[in-house]
Structure formats: C-alpha cells, structure tokens
Image (tube, coloured by chain):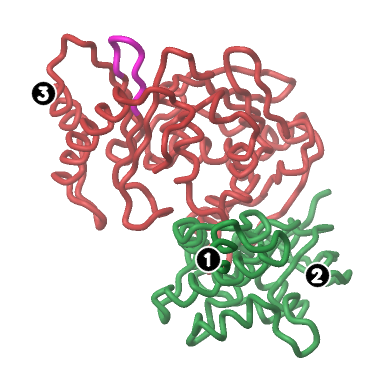
Chain colours: A green, B red
Amino acid sequence: MHLKADTRHRVTVTLNGRERAGYAEPRTLLSDFLRHELGATGTRVGCEHGVCGACTVLVDGRASRSCLMLAVQAQGRDLQTVESLAREETLNDLQQAFRKHHALQCGFCTAGILISSTEFLTRVSRPTETQVRDMLSGHLCRCTGYTGIVNAILEVAETRDHEVSGPTDKEQENNNV
Amino acid sequence: MKPATFDYTRPGTRREACDLLHEFGDDARLIAGGQSLMAVLNMRFAQPGLLIDIAGIQDLHYIEDRGDYLAVGAGITQAELLEHPGLAEKVPLLAQAMPWIGHAQTRNRGTVCGSIAHADPSAELPLCLTALGGEVVLEARKGKTRKLPAHEFFQGILTTAKRTDELITEVRFPLGQGNERYRFREVSMRHGDFAIVALAVRICGDRTDLTVGGVADRPVRRSMTGNDARASWLNHFAWSLNAQDDAHASAVYRRHLVRELGSRLIDECSAQKDDTHAPQG
C-alpha cells in the first residue's frame, strides 16, 4: 500500500460503534479527520504536538493523542470520542460528576479528560488520588486547578465500585456504628 | 502546526521496509507509535518525502525472555512492556523507570524502540538501556543485521549510529541478577515532562554504577568501587558531563542534582533489600 501525498484516500473507522468513512491526505491528522471529515467536533484541538491532551480519544480502547496520529493510521480501528459518553440527552455518571464538582469552567480540556478518565476507570477500579493526578498529568487545564476534576473522578470510581462489589469492610463497620 | 506533505506506506514485512529504506534513503522516515516523530512533523522540523509505517509488521510484535536478556520488538508499545507480566522481576529498572515516560496517553502508542531511535538525551529508555548495558539490533536490506551496544548506539542529541537504510528491529535489556539492586529517579518540572536530570543506580557487591540522563548529549554511565570517596567521585562525574544552562535549569543546578540526588539514590539503593518491592517514584 502506497498512498500519494496531495491525494485524498478513503479511510474507514468505527466511530462510537458506527462504521464511518471519509477521505484524508496522508498528512491529515486524526484530530482534523474526526472534526472536519466526520463532523465529530466534540474532540478539541489544542497544542497539536501532544502536550495539552485536549484531543485525546480512545483508539482500540486506549487513550491516545489524536494530533499525534495520522488519519490513515486509524484505518480499520475502533475510535471512541466524547460523543459516545452521553445516552440520548442524559449525561453519563462521569459527566454528571464533572458538573456536580465544577470540574470544568471553559470546557476546552474536558472532552480529552473525560476520555482519559473513561479508560483509566476501566483499568483502575479504586484509584488513589495520586493515581488520578498521575493520569491527569497528561492533560492541561488552565481553569480549574484540577481539584474538582480529581474529586469527580474519585467519586465516580467509588460509586461504580460499590455497584459492583458492595461497601468495603471498613464502610460496613462505620455504617453499623 | 500541520505536517508538510509526504507519501505514506505501510509495509507488511521487515524485508519490504528495508527495501524501501534502501530505495528512499534520507528522504524516508520510519514511524511506529509516532509519539516523538508526529510532534516533529507537525512543527515541520522534519519534512520527509515518505513515511514508512512499520506498525503493520506483525513479526516485530514480541517480548521474549531469552535467558540473559529481554528482547523487545519494534512493534511493542511502552504500555505493553510496562504491563508485561513479571517485568518487575525480570528487568526491575524498567519497571521503576517506565512510569516516568511521558504520560499514560502517550505510552499507549509510543514504542520502546521508537524512543531508543529518537535518542532524546533526557529520555528514560535510552538511560535504562545504557545503565544496563543493553543492545540494539539493526536490520538493513537482504537481511543484513548488526548489533550495537547502547554506548556505541547513542552518539549525541537525537543522533545515533543507525544508518538511514537500517531499521531497529529489537532492543535487548539484560535481565536483572539476584545480587543486583536498582534505583531510578528523575527531576522534571511536572511529572511526565522532559527530565532535567534522570538517574539510575545499579549496585552489585562492591561496585556501584551511576547513569545520568538529561545533562550530557547522551546518557552516561560510570562505575565506582568501594575504594572511591563518594562525594569527590560524584563531583568529578557531575563536572565531566559538561552541563549547559537552558530554559528549565542552570548548569549549576544540574550538577547539584547529580551530586545530591546521586548520593541519596546510592544510599537508598544500598539500603534496599528486595528489589521487587521497591517503591516507584
């Protein structure tokens, strides 16, 4: 397979569970392909050199910078963007927690952080604050000071874990008192 | 901040990739995870005519324990190596150092061999490869391969002994030995930023190896024996690295870190009993 520069090539991906296709030059970044070709404008473009984290999407389930990936490299891959989180008009638990904890102000970084957190919570079910902050180190937020974001993620982790495994022994003890 | 135009190709075999490298030479660049190269392309620091994507070459996708070293193929991402079962027992230094590479979001795509090929003097993997005395395996056209030890491979800032017609197929990290202990530490502006100074210590009996990254134009390893006076040995080491001032830190501060952090790390490493339970960070 040899794709010529200055020529648009067909790229097919699974975006948020649906097969989608568009056209991209070899140099087209995945972030631009998502926004301009597929209309998935939830993903934000910030620094375009992998530092700010705003454009983070899931590629085959792993959080990745869409500005550090070419659209043609995404051929045949499974992509998940912020648009996948809400069901109809209802925000998911993570989005609701962000709202409750004031985990966003201008919102530019939020899509990327929600996506990273989504992957993170599937990997680490009961994270410590340090682990959450380590994951967040891959994102720049200039509004919130991160405190609300950390609180929101920790709360969701705890709630989801409760739903799966019930209260911890310690919590059970406290409830009995 | 968009890349200039280039042709893009995704060979299915190593042989095909090497043929392309031979044909296009300087005008071609290899891409695997792209976590260094894409930023370089976006900023147009490099404008290759052809991008050769090796991510589709299936037989570069392996991690193998070969008895005295861990072989990591060019398709393996940093996240895959970090999650490799038993890494902390096999190559304890990697298990300690790898969480410091970039961020989870870049480790998911960035490859181990890609970081070695990029040869950033402050990067963790070149430091580990130098500290452990590992090797890089290169392949050129017609299956011609050669092996280079880390200290010959790294030749300066973003400069290596890899020829333009060669592909790194594998890097080899020597396995940790029962009588060795390791410690890694780095100082950066924020976790995940480029290291101002990164240090790896290996202690084996009477001998202490200290490897320093982020100061000289490549990682540098030196050995100290029980007879050396530590403070003056560290001071000589710090001065020998020809530290430079830059936006992040002064040369004075970098030398200070080599002396102070080096000394602390050696103490911590000496006091450590069982390497597999070493705290990270």
Where does the image place residue B84, in percent across and percent down from the top left? 64, 35
Q: Chain of mark 2?
A: A
- Tag 1: residue type? Asn
On residue B232, the disc is: 3
Determine whether the residue tagged by mark 1 lies in a helix, strand or loop: helix
For image coordinates 75% across by 48% down, the residue present is B9
Residue to which mark 1 is pinned: A174
The answer to which image quadrant residue B252 occupies is top left
For image coordinates 57% across by 85% down, the residue present is A99
Sequence order check, earlier mark of 2 and 1: 2
Residue farthest along the bottom direction in this orientation: A89
Instruction: Answer yes or no: is residue A36 visible.
Output: no
Where does the image place residue A80, in percent across and percent down from the top left? 74, 68
**Segment colored magenta:** B201-208
Determine whether the residue tagged by mark 3 lies in a helix, strand or loop: helix
CB under 8 Å between discs 2 and 3: no
The overriding secondary structure of the stretch rendered in magenta is strand
Examine the rendered structure and indicate whether residue B133 appears above or below residue A18.
Answer: above
Residue to which mark 2 is pinned: A15
Where does the image place residue A9, in percent across and percent down from the top left? 82, 64
Examine the rendered structure and indicate whether residue B59 appears above or below residue B146.
Answer: below
- Bin the neighbour count of mark 3 within 10 Å (Cα to Cα): few under 14, some 14-19, many 20 and up: few
Whether B267 is among the magenta residues is: no
Residue B36 vs residue B262, the one in the foreground: B262
